[in-house]
Amino acid sequence: MKPTALYVYGAGGHGRVVADAAQATATRTVLGFLDDNPRLWGCVCAGLPVVGGRDALASVDPEAEMALGIGSNRARADIAELLLRRGFRLAIVIHPNAVIARGVQIGEGTYVAPLAVLHSDASVGVACIVNTGAVVEHDCRLDAFAHVSPRAALGGGARLGEGAHAGIGAILLPATRLGPWATLGAGAVMVASMPEGVTAVGVPARVVPLAAGGVS
Ligand SMILES: CC(C)(COP(=O)(O)OP(=O)(O)OC[C@H]1O[C@@H](n2cnc3c(N)ncnc32)[C@H](O)[C@@H]1OP(=O)(O)O)[C@@H](O)C(=O)NCCC(=O)NCCS
């Protein structure tokens, strides 16, 4: 079967990681990157050309899939919405060394990294990131644009609201919920649910004031 052509939107660190995962199977051919940074246009990144930014969408193969290579939840949401409006299909990129149990649902535009585990009946929304070595236990739910960082772990039935971000090594106890666009800091342990938009750090996690401009 002919491999599917794919571009990665975002040529930074996360974009290169997503391109690497997409190239790890024979089912896809990665044609290059798009990026909003004009300084990258025409450059070669991880051996692939950066063909341009939003304007270049008019000239790429409309049948090509688009993978999302952007770490910021807000920016990834914006680009996902733009690409869908322009009629592109968002690629689900799953590294072959991820472990996906039966009954797991994964939304379009989501990236699942090496050594990530998605356990029975977990549900992952559109344009999420389940990053390297993350553990998403049975019956968890990630709403659109959420990010589970490297080595973060969600106990059974835990939930990340839309755009929520669990930082590196953070832990959500079973059945807790991190509200929409909230951030759980690196290494934090969330023992009770947190509301929309907060940043919480520490063990047990406590809300801290947001830096100017917020996060994610
Ligand atoms: C929680 C976080 C978002 C806070 O970022 P910020 O809003 O810029 O906050 P600041 O760096 O100004 O820190 C605010 C306070 O919280 C403390 N703090 C920040 N992150 C912390 C963490 N993970 N654990 C404990 N304390 C933390 C700071 O020391 C500071 O304390 P102080 O006011 O006593 O000096 C950030 O530190 C973090 O953990 N991000 C996760 C990054 C990540 O996992 N990225 C994934 C990449 S794949």
Image (cartoon, helix red, strand yellow):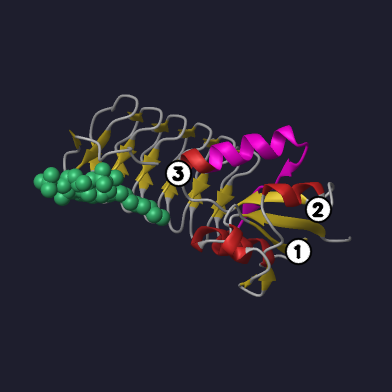
Q: CA distance from mark 3 to mark 2?
A: 28 Å
Q: Estimate the x, y position of residue 173 in percent, counting from the top left.
A: 29, 37
Q: Is residue 103 left or right of residue 130?
A: right
- Determine if the C-beta at disc 3 is less than 8 A from ligand 1: yes
- Determine if the C-beta at disc 2 is less than 8 A from ligand 1: no
Instruction: Decide which of 45, 5 is in the foreground and name it.
Output: 45
Pointer 1 local density, CA inside 10 Å: few below 14, some 14–19, many at least 20? some
Identify the residue at horizontal 65%, vertical 63% (top origin).
41
The answer to which image quadrant residue 108 occupies is: top right
Q: Amino acid at mark 1?
A: Leu
Instruction: Decide which of 161, 58 is in the foreground and name it.
Output: 58
Q: Is residue 79 magenta?
A: yes
Q: Is residue 65 above or below residue 52?
A: above
Identify the residue at horizontal 75%, vertical 56% (top origin).
6
Question: Is label 1 in a helix, a strand or a loop?
Answer: strand
Residue 147 is tagged as 3
Q: Which residues are magenta?
A: 76-94
Q: Earlier in the sequence, mark 3 or mark 2?
A: 2
Q: CA distance from mark 3 to mark 1?
A: 26 Å
Contact? badges 3 and 1 (CB < 8 Å): no
Q: Is residue 192 visible?
A: yes
Instruction: Decide which of 169, 209 is in the foreground and name it.
Output: 209
Q: Which residue is mark 2?
A: 60
Q: Earlier in the sequence, mark 2 or mark 1?
A: 1
Q: Is residue 96 visible?
A: no
Identify the residue at horizontal 50%, vertical 31% (top origin).
143
Q: Earlier in the sequence, mark 3 or mark 1?
A: 1
The answer to which image quadrant residue 125 occupies is: top right
Q: Is residue 150 above or below residue 144?
A: below
Identify the residue at horizontal 80%, vertical 47% (top origin).
58
Residue 31 is tagged as 1
